[in-house]
Image (cartoon, grey):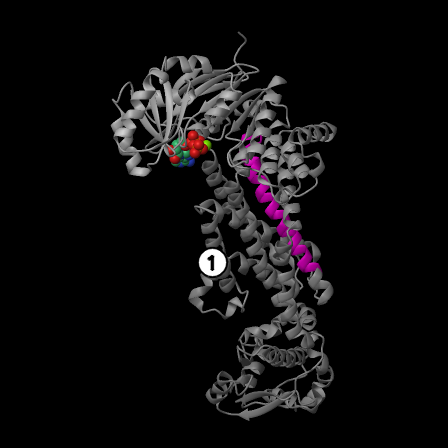
């Protein structure tokens, strides 16, 4: 009971603090909203952009590569892209890097050959179309990737259904007709399309994987959970730091003089932080679902990821407070760890784009495991089973941090 | 005599190499106000912290309401009310919410809690401000709520650690009257202070603590008797700092002066008989070229006791 009273006291105190509300709830919504505004038009299937400069390097000696060339400059796309065909990949990439083009699509020389061979032998040879994008551009790389992926999916489907074969004359536009007709609404449908085809054509998809990872990132479904985790970490550092704040305020020593076991006091404090975190996450998820019409996927699995993430973040905060000498040190340490975890864990840019040697560090962060789980749910439309590993890691981290923090605090407060 | 409500035996606390409290033993009877009088850093807060389960004694133990502080902390905590030296309240919630929260920490609830909140607000004289946030209160009002929290669960003994520090004379008066009033209703109080006047006014018995040691213990009359027939002359002169110290050294051995110490702008001279010594003292000061501004003869008091025992003034 006393645990709940302490947790509740902390929660209402925080909810009444207007500054804290801004930090906990409004700031993440505003940040998510800004990103949402930047990516919003694409998300709603509008097309405010045209003549996005892209390079197409089609080295394919076969015919399937032509499908890409044809579709990318098809009149159905209404001048969305300004395609420059080139046979110099290095120059194309340089153009992207210098900002002259937003993306370069590369189809390798033996693309058709490999693909058809793979289809006939049913061998699992990876065949790749690469999309090089300008990392500083915000929206256009996603559009290019989405379109290229859509084409890939269509090709994939045609291959599986046997409509593309060695001896068959290709009438690309006819074959791709249905897909092309939909191109206007391609971007918002990408996620859905993936979800639909993932199950049926999984074999085909491995044969024709796109080399560029960012293809499946609808910006908002990515940045909404990323932002939420980032701000959650901040507020959990804040809330658990209130243990040290109460130590300096004298209310913690006073609590210890009441007939309340120290373990209950700590559970109450950490529980209060946990409650705040759940509340914060819930508001962010609901708000972004309503305002940005974001589909968070399986609700039960979503709840599980939220609980596990908040538990892990709270426990990490408690551990940092328990290790720090005082409030100031805890503040500095907490912010540093929050920022580093965010950078490593994919808050600002996808973690998979980090260099290989950073990957193990990335996988040591709460952000990475939580975000990956959220992405499974939003993009993958996965169910509970798919996120068991993520939940396991998050809960494992949470349990370890929690118990170490509890032991350290106990020793610290009764000497 | 009844069993004491509190019996401390050989309480000691060491912080690293520093011995903050050394072998402190005393009893407090039910219904008694007991003061621990001592200068800054004497070990008053450390003693109270050990008695309230905040610090584990390095040595010794205490029985409160029959329970050991080291072995039955939970029972002890239910029996004591604690008023910390620093205000320990939540500023961003109201006085009533603070009382409700702390009451729950003592296991109170429901109608009984409401009743106790109303009663303690009455004691604090803040019933009309109950729903204002504590951060909007004056220092004195916060002090009063700080005390009210310690009374919520009707403890058998109340610990008050320098509750008047940093208060204006009016709030201070109010607090002292509250303590006396609570005591009249039978509450035992352990009161710490470095103000001699407070200890004199409130206490049935007084323990003088210095450097972690309890150097004297008894009623005010018993304590002042230990300085015997000594009087204290407080003389204000036109000297300060080093010049004052030099004058003080000169005065020791002049006439009947057995000891001299300085106290904010004046000399504190211990003499056998103030009236007999006065002429010699005045002449002695004049011989040093100093001018006297004020002379005050003090009957034996706790200040004199402290001076007598430690050779230092109680206030620094
Ligand atoms: N947590 C601690 N760690 C180390 N030393 C401490 C600690 N708490 C108190 N001390 C030391 O123990 C001695 C007694 O301190 P204490 O706070 O009990 O004195 P006090 O009589 O309450 O003084 P004051 O009138 O200033 O409140 C001091 O020298 C103090 O520096
Ligand atoms: Mg003190």
Element type at mark 1: helix
Q: Is residue A103 above or below residue A9?
A: below
Q: Is residue B37 left or right of residue B268?
A: right
Give the percent coordinates (x, y) of residue B246: 26, 33
| Mark 1 belongs to chain | A
Q: Is residue A23 above or below residue A294?
A: above
Q: Is residue A407 left or right of residue A232?
A: left
Q: Is residue A5 left or right of residue A325?
A: right
Outermost residue on the top side: it is B1
Give the percent coordinates (x, y) of residue A295: 70, 64
Q: Is residue A248 above or below residue B57?
A: below
Residue A380 can be seen, yes or no: no
Main secondary structure type of the part rendered in magenta: helix
**Image quarter for residue B129?**
top right
**Image quarter for residue B44?**
top left
Give the percent coordinates (x, y) of residue A225: 62, 62
Give the percent coordinates (x, y) of residue A7: 62, 42
Q: Is residue B139 above or below residue A175?
A: above
At 49% from the left edge and 18% from the top edge, which residue is drawn?
Answer: B63
The residue nearer to you, when weighing A409 against B149, is B149
Instruction: Tell me which segment is drawn in magenta.
Output: A257-286
Q: Is mark 1 within 8 Å of ligand 1?
A: no
**Image quarter for residue A119?**
bottom right
Q: What residue would you read off at disc 1?
A: A336
Q: Quadrant of the C terminus of chain B?
A: top left
């Amino acid at each position: 009971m006393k645990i709940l009273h302490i947790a509740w006291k902390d929660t209402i105190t925080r909810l009444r603090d207007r500054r804290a509300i801004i930090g906990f709830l409004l700031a993440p919504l505003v940040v998510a909203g800004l990103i949402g505004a930047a990516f919003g038009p694409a998300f709603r299937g509008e097309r405010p952009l045209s003549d996005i400069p892209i390079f197409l390097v089609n080295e394919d000696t076969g015919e399937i590569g032509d499908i890409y060339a044809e579709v990318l400059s098809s009149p159905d796309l209404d001048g969305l892209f300004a395609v420059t065909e080139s046979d110099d990949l290095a120059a194309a990439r340089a153009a992207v890097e210098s900002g002259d083009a937003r993306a370069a699509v590369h189809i390798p020389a033996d693309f058709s050959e490999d693909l058809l061979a793979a289809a006939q032998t049913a061998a699992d040879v990876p065949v790749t179309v690469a999309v090089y994008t300008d990392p500083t551009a915000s929206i256009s790389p996603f559009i290019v990737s989405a379109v290229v992926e859509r084409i890939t999916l269509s090709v994939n489907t045609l291959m599986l259904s046997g409509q593309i074969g060695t001896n068959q004359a290709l009438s690309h536009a006819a074959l791709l007709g249905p897909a092309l007709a939909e191109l206007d609404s391609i971007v918002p449908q990408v996620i859905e399309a993936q979800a639909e085809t993932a199950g049926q054509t999984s074999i085909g998809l491995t044969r024709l994987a796109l080399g560029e990872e960012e293809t499946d990132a609808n910006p908002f479904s990515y940045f909404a959970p990323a932002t939420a985790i980032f701000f959650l970490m901040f507020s959990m550092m804040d809330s658990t730091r209130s243990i040290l704040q109460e130590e300096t305020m004298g209310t913690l020593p006073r609590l210890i003089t009441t007939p309340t076991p120290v373990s209950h006091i700590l559970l109450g404090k950490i529980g209060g932080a946990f409650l705040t975190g759940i509340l914060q996450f819930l508001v962010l998820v609901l708000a972004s679902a309503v305002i940005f019409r974001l589909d968070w996927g399986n609700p039960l699995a979503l709840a599980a990821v939220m609980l596990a993430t908040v538990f892990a973040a709270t426990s990490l905060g408690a551990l940092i407070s328990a290790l720090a000498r005082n409030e100031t040190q805890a503040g500095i340490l907490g912010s540093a760890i929050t920022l580093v975890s965010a950078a490593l864990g994919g808050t600002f840019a996808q973690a998979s784009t980090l260099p290989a040697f950073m990957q193990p560090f990335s996988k040591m962060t709460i952000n990475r495991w939580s975000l990956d789980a959220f992405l499974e749910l939003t993009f993958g439309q996965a169910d509970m089973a798919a996120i068991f590993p993520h939940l396991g890691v998050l809960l494992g981290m949470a349990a370890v941090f929690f118990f170490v923090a509890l032991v350290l605090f106990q020793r610290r407060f009764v000497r | 005599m009844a069993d004491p409500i509190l019996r401390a035996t050989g309480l000691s606390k060491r912080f690293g190499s520093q011995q903050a409290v050394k072998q402190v033993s005393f009893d407090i009877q039910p219904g008694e106000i007991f003061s621990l009088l001592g200068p800054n850093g004497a070990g008053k807060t450390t003693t109270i912290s050990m008695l309230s389960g905040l610090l584990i004694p390095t040595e010794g133990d205490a029985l409160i309401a029959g329970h050991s502080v080291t072995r039955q902390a939970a029972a002890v905590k239910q029996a004591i009310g604690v008023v910390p030296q620093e205000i320990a309240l939540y500023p961003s919630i109201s006085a009533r919410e603070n009382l409700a929260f702390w009451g729950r920490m003592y296991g109170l609830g429901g109608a009984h809690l409401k009743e106790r909140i109303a009663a303690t607000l009455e004691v604090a004289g803040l019933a009309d401000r109950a729903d204002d946030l504590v951060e909007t209160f004056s220092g004195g009002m916060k002090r009063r709520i700080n005390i009210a929290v310690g009374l919520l669960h009707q403890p058998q003994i109340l610990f008050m650690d320098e509750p008047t520090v940093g208060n204006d004379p009016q709030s201070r008066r109010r607090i002292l009257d509250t303590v006396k009033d609570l005591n009249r209703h039978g509450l035992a109080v352990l009161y710490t202070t470095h103000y001699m006047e407070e200890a004199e006014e409130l206490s049935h018995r007084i323990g003088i603590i210095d450097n972690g040691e309890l150097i004297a213990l008894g009623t005010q009359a018993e304590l002042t008797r230990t300085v015997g027939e000594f009087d204290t002359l407080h003389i204000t002169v036109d000297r300060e700092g080093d010049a004052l110290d030099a004058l003080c050294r000169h005065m020791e051995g002049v006439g009947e002066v057995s000891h001299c110490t300085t106290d904010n702008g004046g000399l504190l001279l211990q003499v056998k008989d103030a009236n007999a010594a006065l002429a010699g003292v005045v002449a002695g000061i004049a011989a040093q070229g100093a001018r006297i501004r004020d002379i005050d003869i003090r009957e034996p008091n706790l200040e004199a006791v402290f001076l007598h025992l430690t050779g230092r003034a109680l206030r620094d």
